Amino acid sequence: MADSLLHTFRFQLKLRRSPAQAAGDGAFTSTISGAPLSDGAFQECSGLEIELDIQELTEGGRNDGVIRRVGRAKYSPLVLKRGMFHGSSGGVNRDLWNWLQSISRGERPVPRYDGLVQVMTPSGASVVATWAFNRGLPLKVRGPELNGKTGEIAIEELHIAHEGLQLVES
């Protein structure tokens, strides 16, 4: 059942538990192998961005320009729209909501998840490109606008803050 639903979506998301590591230790892996949270499919994806902070240094006696150095990288949150997480039986998977609610209830340490965002072909048969992110946290989840005429149960928006982003081979 889940596979028949996925052909209308163009982006897959796979979330796996991050290995225990200190924040900011520089470790990054483009493979995800921890315990799965869930797999989902979405119609829109944005936030695949890296912005480098360029610092300008003025040098005494040099009036014709400045020296530019690279500072920190900033990663935009991923924003996935109009999708859903599915279970192996084809029904809706509640793990994402449970993750968000456990954090809001004060669960510590905060569980983090690494993920893959995969761009699918129009038929949904194969992956065209894959971005990997690490140490993700749920920033925002917005449910559907419930309407008795449509019966939709999809997630309207999912925002994930993370600590690194890479384009990897599919």
Image (cartoon, rainbow, N blue to C red):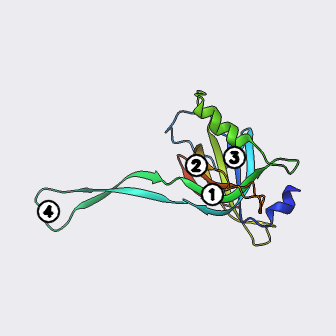
Rendered image: mark on residue 80: 1
Q: Which residue is mark 2?
A: 160
Q: Of the residues under marks 4 and 1, which one precedes in the sequence?
A: 4
Q: Is residue 160 above or below residue 105?
A: below
Q: Of the residues under marks 2 and 3, which one precedes in the sequence?
A: 3
130 displayed left or right of 71: right
120 displayed left or right of 23: right
Q: What kind of residue is marked 3?
A: Leu
Q: Are marks 3 and 1 in contact (CB under 8 Å)?
A: no
Q: Quadrant of residue 2?
A: bottom right
Q: Is residue 143 above or below residue 48?
A: above
Q: Quadrant of residue 97?
A: top right
Residue depicted at x 78% and y 58%:
151
Q: What kind of residue is marked 4?
A: Arg
Q: CA distance from mark 2 to mark 3?
A: 11 Å
Rendering coords of residue 70 (x, y %): 36, 55
Rendering coords of residue 30 (x, y %): 64, 50
Rendered image: mark on residue 15: 3
Q: CA distance from mark 3 to mark 1?
A: 13 Å
Q: Of the residues under marks 2 and 4, which one precedes in the sequence?
A: 4
Q: Out of 36 and 3, give the one closest to the viewer.
A: 3
Rendering coords of residue 129 (x, y %): 67, 65
Q: What kind of residue is marked 1?
A: Leu
Q: Is residue 94 above or below residue 144?
A: above
Quadrant position of the C terminus in the picture: bottom right
Q: Of the residues under marks 1 and 2, which one precedes in the sequence?
A: 1
Q: Of the residues under marks 3 and 4, which one precedes in the sequence?
A: 3
